[in-house]
Amino acid sequence: RLHAAPDAVRLDDFDRTYPPGETYAKWELQKIAPFFGSGADLFFQFVHKGDDEHYVHLRSGDDNSYSLGTEDEFRVQEWPYLEWEWKVTRTPTGGDVRVKALDDQAGSICVIVDPGLTGFKSLCYLWENDGPKDTPLTSTKRSDSRYLILRTVTEDGLGRWYSERRNMLEDYQRVFGEAPDEQAVLGMQIDSDSTGSSLLP
């Protein structure tokens, strides 16, 4: 669930109803492995529960990793703050972002700078099984991807909504040592291919 402060632009509140697996102009299925095409409808769904609760539900099978990303580009310097709510109901068994063979997450929100190029940089906010919170980490798979753990099962449990507010500009400067100069997009990811875990309901 993505919300906006009074001085912000609302990215999405998922207040429209879509058939399972159907995205629309604002969101793009960026990758899914090993399934493509019609198989995608198993793994995400826009959910409505009453008038005030709408969200996108991400799921992942045993060998899957994928993301939903926006096509709306923005400059982090002009729009540095990001607010959202998220909830995790299950996590990859043994998942640990610090170990390459176990690098799976039940949820991450990413800001991707200079998208579409192989040299893009990304900062992802993670929900992990355990690990040091708010401590810069470098991906074991890609040196230009950096992580900050915001929530862990150990401390925060499962099945509860949490609200977040981050200054992306400050966080980016902290993990990369420089300000982002290029356009950026946002993405939501779920990942269970390394551990072979099932994150289906």
Image (spheres, rainbow, N blue to C red):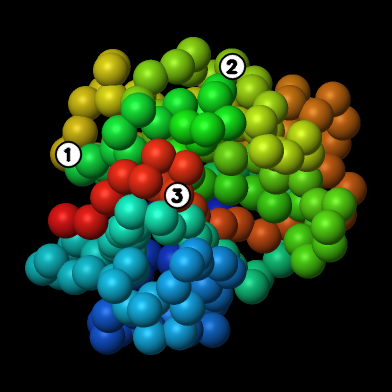
x%, y% of residue 106? 37, 43
**C-alpha gap between disc 3 and disc 1:** 22 Å
Q: Nearer the viewer, mark 3 or mark 1?
A: 3
Residue that carries the numbered disc 1 in the rendered image: 159
**Crowdedness of circle 1 by 10 Å Cα count: few (<14), some, many (20+)?**
few
Q: Quadrant of the N terminus?
A: bottom left
x%, y% of residue 85? 35, 45
Residue type at numbered disc 2: Thr
> Residue drawn 54% across and 84% down?
25
Give the numbered dot on residue 62.
none
Residue 146, image quadrant = top right
Residue that carries the numbered disc 3 in the rendered image: 193
Q: Earlier in the sequence, mark 2 or mark 3?
A: 2
Residue that carries the numbered disc 2 in the rendered image: 135
Q: Secondary structure at mark 3?
A: loop
Q: Secondary structure at mark 2?
A: loop
